[in-house]
Amino acid sequence: MKKHTIIFSVLTIMLGIMVASCNKNDNEEEDVQYYGTSVSSTLVSKFVLGSNEDVMHNLDSVFFTIDQDRKIIYNADSLPVGTNVRKLTVAVTFPYSVSSAQFHVTGGKLMKDTTITYTSETNDTIDFTGNVTLKVTSSDGNHVATYVVKVNVHQVEPDQLTFAQSLRRDLPNVNGTPQQVKTVLQGDTYLCLIKDGDKYVLSGTPTLGVGTWSKTELNVPFMPVVNSLTATSDALYMLDSTGELYSSTDQGTTWADCQQQWVNIVGGYGEKVLGVMQEDGVFKHDEYPRASNFTPVAIGDNFPVSGATPLVTGSNEWTSSEQVVMVGGVLQDGSLTNASWGYDGHGWGRIDVRDNTILPAIADAVLIPYYTYDIDSTRLTVAVKQVTWLVMGGRLAGGSLNRTTYVSYNQGMSWIKGASSLQQPDYMPSFYGAQAFVQTEKVSGAQLAPSTVTKPITDWECPYVYIVGGYASGGSVLNNIWKGQLNRLTFKPLF
């Protein structure tokens, strides 16, 4: 171990001995004390990039972390993808005077092996596409510190909604050519019902990403309409080919006749299932089990009798009960609608602002509660997370399948076309009648430097979008489970 002796006064010596004895570590090459010892004479206290509007607006506002322990200077929040970092000026602040400071660049696109002596008046540019170090020598020439300097740039588009082909999976337990498929989430279990030949197979898994499913071949006492399968908190529901409603409280092992006939199951809400019945030619809202004071009420002409998206839970400040939302669907006259409807446990209400949407009339789409980021136009590295709902897939009024992703920042009240980064990739087939789920999973990554939190961040949670099954334009089942995510959500949190 090397010892550095600094003679100031008896008091300073005694203080240095006391501090050193409290921080001594036999595994270190030298005692590291930033203040009161000579090590402080090589410190860097601030590092910023020079202003350059041709590269990025407010480039000089990008914050750089200085890890004094490991001698690393870096921007934890990476610059936007494609930022040109070949010719950047810098400004460095030292708390004490130094005899020299030299940048050394190797392997850059412009600078292969270049040394630049830095002073407060230096205007030389540095090529940060290569390996950059900053060598600082103390004013007395006896001490040297070498910092690694990194200007991080995103290698992928942060706000791209990515569905990687390598992560696509097949539907579970398909032996032949499936004719119908429907997937629901009940509690913590995803249940996928497939009509495969003359068999009905129900498979379950706690996570869609792993691909391990349990398998049960159902013995149902009726002709199931697979697409009507719906889960509540305590039961599964399904219609038979005549519209009779059946329920199962043991995940499909046994089924009971509910003694109600429906045109369509709308979705589950807590312990009850919501549906549409028809009585004397009139379509009515219905539920099961019916509350003692419940009476089926006629629906309006603009409420969809089928084909709306599966229900999605919304958040609001106006009601004390949970609200669920659906979008689109088929009206009584067979036409399609673009309306958004909400249910709060007591009744249905239309929630969309009709003159403030470009969402087309659509049926059998998926509604996905997700996130995007609002980028500060004056500081491109500042991004604010915002709740964003997506509509993907579905059938359009002319019969074609929708490939445009629409977004809502107010939970279905208005819709706009999503940015190009949110659109389906070309290799992902057009679909209708699929189901979409958002599943939060842990992501792990190497720790670049100590975080500002007490415990360093080595893993974090990322919400992934899963689009399961669905149908192609000809009505054939799509044997797909697609996994996607906004790239930014996979980046290591800064705090």
Image: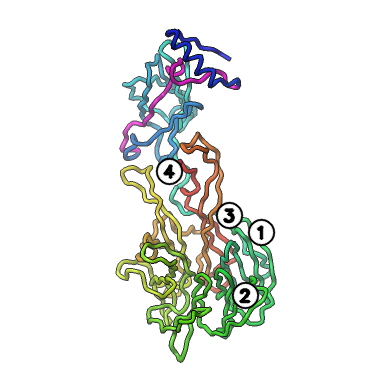
300 magenta-colored: no
State the residue lying farthest toward the bottom.
280
Find disc 1 in the rendering and name its residue.
Answer: 212
Mark in the foreground, 2 or 1: 2
Task: Confirm whether residue 339 shows in the render.
Answer: yes
How packed is label 2: few (under 14 Cα within 10 Å), some, or many (20 or more)? some
45 magenta-colored: yes
Task: Confirm whether residue 404 shows in the render.
Answer: no
Q: Earlier in the sequence, mark 4 or mark 1?
A: 4
Residue at image position (52%, 17%) is 20
How packed is label 4: few (under 14 Cα within 10 Å), some, or many (20 or more)? few
Residue type at tag 4: Val
Residue type at tag 2: Ser
Dots 4 and 3: beta carbons under 8 Å? no
Q: Earlier in the sequence, mark 2 or mark 1?
A: 1
Q: Earlier in the sequence, mark 4 or mark 2?
A: 4
Could you say which is closer to the camera, residue 293 or residue 166? Answer: 293
* Cα–Cα gap, marks 3 and 2: 33 Å
Find disc 2 in the rendering and name its residue.
Answer: 248
Q: Earlier in the sequence, mark 4 or mark 3?
A: 4
* Cα–Cα gap, marks 4 and 3: 23 Å
22 up-or-down from 367: above or below: above
Residue type at tag 1: Thr
Find disc 4 in the rendering and name its residue.
Answer: 81
* Cα–Cα gap, marks 1 and 3: 14 Å
Q: Earlier in the sequence, mark 1 or mark 3?
A: 3
Q: Which residues are magenta?
A: 27-55
Find disc 3 in the rendering and name its residue.
Answer: 167
Q: Main secondary structure of the magenta part?
A: loop
- x and y percentages locating residue 81 in the rendered image: 43, 43
Q: Is residue 232 left or right of residue 126?
A: right
